[in-house]
Image (spheres, grey):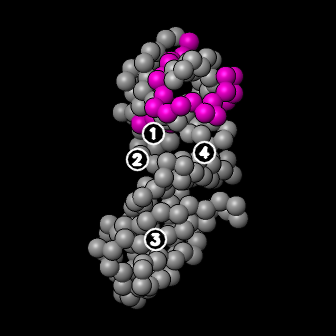
Amino acid sequence: MRELIKKEQLVTIVPQDFKKTNKGKVTEVSQDGFSMELKYKPEGLVVNHICEFYSMTDNGYLYFESYIQALENNVVSIANPVKHRFLQRRKYTRIKFVEDIDLVTDNNSYKAKTLDLSAGGMKIRTEANLDIEQEYRVTIHLSHEQEVKCKYQLIRVERDDNGIYTISGRFTQLSNVNKMTLVQYCMQKEMENQNR
């Protein structure tokens, strides 16, 4: 683990109740695991319960599961994981995601269809000639019970011969809970696709 986790590295910890997601800085690395000082009060973190861990490294986005060995004040000790994987070089896992979506401003609503999705943004297709300077409110329905609300900012717009626009954009005003919801959702879908 020493080659993957280093002192001062930022790590996100996601317990079973992902709304209690926390993050912290690695303070010590040993043969048995590592310790980290949490940024927030450790609510929802339980000793000996399995959590998910994410961290950006030189080799890509690191993901692994492990358990908390000890918890004292804002310092947690994490056992070495049995296995780990690098999700990909890009910061967030991107998946194919085809759904109808509305892009909403104070005055208008525009229909679009998503093409792909990550915790950082999404690609869409639309017949609407959207204003690249405008931010749009979006609600992304991941399932019947799960949705993410945020703002969407256009980055790149391409128009084909049929007058259809393909747009790449990023999410803004995305809460930590919604970001982790998207990270987990995209990662689970990618793993399901790989296991088919």
Q: Residues within 10 Å of mark 3 (few under 14, many from 20)?
A: some
Say if 180 sits above or below 115 in the image.
above
> Circle 2 sits on which residue?
90
Q: How many labels does the image show?
A: 4
Left or right: 106 with respect to 49? left
Q: Give the mark, 3 or 4, whose residue is nearer the N terminus.
A: 4
> Circle 4 sits on which residue?
19
Q: Does the magenta stretch include residue 98?
A: no
> Circle 3 sits on which residue?
137
From the image, state whether disc 4 or disc 1 is nearer to you: 4
Query: What amino acid type is highlighted by mark number 1?
Result: Tyr
Say if 162 sits above or below 32 in the image.
below
The reply to whether dot 1 and dot 2 touch (C-beta < 8 Å) is yes
Look at 38% across and 88% down and name the residue there: 163
**Separation of disc 4 and disc 1 at Cα?**
21 Å
From the image, state whether disc 2 or disc 3 is nearer to you: 3
Q: Give the mark, 2 or 3, whose residue is nearer the N terminus.
A: 2
Pinpoint residue 191: horizontal percent, then vertical percent: 62, 47
Look at 53% across and 63% down and name the residue there: 149
